[in-house]
């Protein structure tokens, strides 16, 4: 059974810092991995989808990397801003029907 | 496109009552799914569908029924609500089981 761990569970940084959020998963037989953002009381917003054949995927100030063989993904946020404050969730997709399995998330707070 | 829509946004039920959470998407996506999100547990898959007429169980299916008579709609039925079903429910869809998944805004359900 796939298990997903996100470290740290919470992170507080001053504005402008570059930061890394970590995601590890136990079953490397995945099709892809999706990173989401969730604001308090809201739904999930897809940030990046990285395919199992890719090493990196970039969108603006966000960069996701994937090392499938070691069961790790990282989300790099450059020049953080207070508007980046949210919970970030990682979800690898695998299995016969391609279901997402979620980690518990990293709660990020960026202080002005 | 409206994307993935869910109704209602909030609902309070008494133990033993039944209700249906509605989910619709206008993107012609084949894959649809239901998750519940509980504090400290992350998102867990309840049921999913890979196309009209096809449904299957996820990680936590007990107490819930689904059907998929059209591509657009994927309702979730609670047959006899229990306090343990108090949660936030999210519906999601994607073109296929291996594509980027899009989430609705959620339904916050309280069972007293």
Image (cartoon, grey):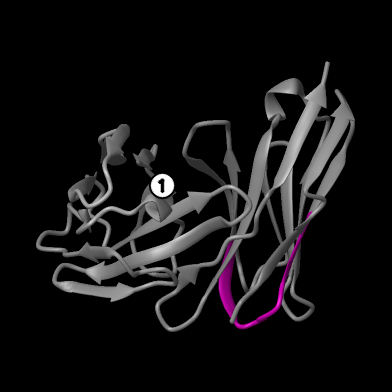
Residue at screen point 61% across, 77% down: A2
Q: For the stretch drawn in magenta, what is the main secondary structure?
A: strand
Residue at screen point 79% across, 78% down: A70
Residue A25 belongs to magenta span: yes
Chain of the residue displaying label 1: B
Q: Residue furthest left?
A: B69
**Quarter of the picture holding the C terminus of chain A:** top right
* Residue B56 in the image, given as x and y percentages of width and height: 29, 75
> Along the line of sight, which residue is nearer the eye, A78 or A70?
A70
Residue B33 belongs to magenta span: no
Q: Residue furthest top?
A: A112
**Quarter of the picture holding the N terminus of chain A:** bottom right
Residue at screen point 49% across, 81% down: A95
> Along the line of sight, which residue is nearer the eye, B50 or A101?
A101
- Where A57 sits versus B63, above or below? above
> Residue tagged by mark 1?
B86
Left/right of residue A14 with respect to residue B39 in the rendered view: right
Q: Which residues are magenta?
A: A22-33
> Along the line of sight, which residue is nearer the eye, A87 or A81?
A87
């Amino acid at each position: 059974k796939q298990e997903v761990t996100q470290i740290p569970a919470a992170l507080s940084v001053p504005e402008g810092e570059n930061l890394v959020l970590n995601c590890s998963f136990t079953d490397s037989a995945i099709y892809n991995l999706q990173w989401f953002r969730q604001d308090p009381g809201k739904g999930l917003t897809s940030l990046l989808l990285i395919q199992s054949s890719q090493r990196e995927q970039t969108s603006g100030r966000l960069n996701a990397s994937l090392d499938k063989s070691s069961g790790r993904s990282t989300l790099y946020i450059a020049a953080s801003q207070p508007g980046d404050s949210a919970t970030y969730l990682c979800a690898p997709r695998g299995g016969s029907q391609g279901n997402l399995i979620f980690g518990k998330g990293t709660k990020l707070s960026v202080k002005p | 496109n409206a994307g993935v829509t869910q109704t209602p946004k909030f609902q309070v039920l008494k133990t033993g009552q039944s209700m249906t959470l509605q989910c619709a998407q206008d993107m012609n996506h084949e894959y649809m799914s239901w998750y519940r999100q509980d504090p400290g547990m992350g998102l867990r898959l309840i049921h999913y569908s890979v196309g009209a007429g096809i449904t299957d169980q996820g990680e936590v299916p007990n107490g819930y029924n689904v059907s998929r008579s059209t591509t657009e709609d994927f309702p979730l039925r609670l047959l006899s609500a229990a306090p343990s079903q108090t949660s936030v429910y999210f519906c999601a869809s994607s073109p296929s089981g291996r594509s980027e998944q899009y989430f609705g805004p959620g339904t916050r359900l309280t069972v007293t």
